[in-house]
Image: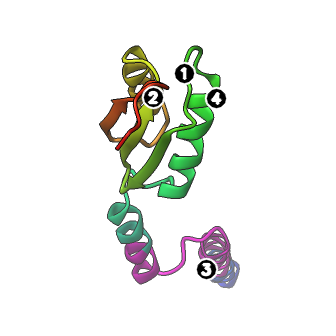
Amino acid sequence: MKANGASKLIGAIFAVAIASCATYANAQAGGGTPADMSAQSQSVAARPNQNRSDSQIVRDVRRAFTRTTSLNSTGIHVAARHGVVTLTGWVPQRSQIQRAGNAARSVRGVKSVSNRLTVRTRHSSGH
C-alpha cells in the first residue's frame, strides 16, 4: 500500500508542477493574471480600428496622390482627424477633384473623405 500512496503523491506533485509551468508560460506570453487579461482586452476594445495614426494616414494620402496619374497635388492640403480626411485647396482641372478624392479613399485607415477642393486655372487670380 505504501507504493500506491507514493505513486499518488508523485502524481499530485507532477500535476502541480505542470500547472505551475503553464501559469509561468502564460505570464511570459503576456497572458498574466486575469486582471491583466481584462485590462488587455479593454485596451484592444477601446481602439478597434485605430491601428493607424492620423499622421500616417496624411502621409499615405500624399503618397497616393503621387501615384495617381493626371493629378497635380501641389495645391492640395490634406488633414486627418480620427481617420476622416479633409482635402482643401485647389487643382487646375475639375476632373482632378474626383481623382484626389478617390486616391484618398483608397488609403488604408481612411474612414471618409471630405473633399473641399476647388478648380483654379492659371488665369484666375484666386482672390
Magenta stretch: includes residue 38:
yes
Amino acid bearing label 1:
Leu
The alpha-carbon separation of the residues under discs 2 and 4 comes to 14 Å
Amino acid bearing label 2:
Val
Name the residue that disc number 2 marks: 91
Amino acid bearing label 3:
Val
Label 4 SS:
helix
Report the magenta residues as a range. Answer: 13-39
Graded by Cα atoms within 10 Å as few (under 14), some (14 to 19) or many (20 or more), the crowding at tag 4 reads: some
Name the residue that disc number 3 marks: 16
Q: Is there any visible trace of residue 114 in the rendered image?
A: yes
Q: Which residue occupies the foreground of this view, 34 or 123?
A: 123
In x, y percent, where is residue 76?
48, 39
**Magenta highlight: main SS:** helix
Q: Nearer the viewer, mark 3 or mark 1?
A: 1
Q: Nearer the viewer, mark 2 or mark 4?
A: 2
Mark number displayed over residue 28: none
Label 2 SS:
strand
The alpha-carbon separation of the residues under discs 3 and 2 comes to 71 Å
Q: Is residue 91 above or below residue 50?
A: above
Magenta stretch: includes residue 11:
no
Name the residue that disc number 1 marks: 71
In x, y percent, where is residue 85?
38, 45
Of callouts 3 and 1, which one flags the residue occurring earlier in the amino acid sequence?
3
- Asked if marks 1 and 2 touch (Cβ < 8 Å), the reply is yes
Q: Is residue 5 above or below residue 88?
A: below
Name the residue that disc number 4 marks: 66
In x, y percent, where is residue 23?
59, 76
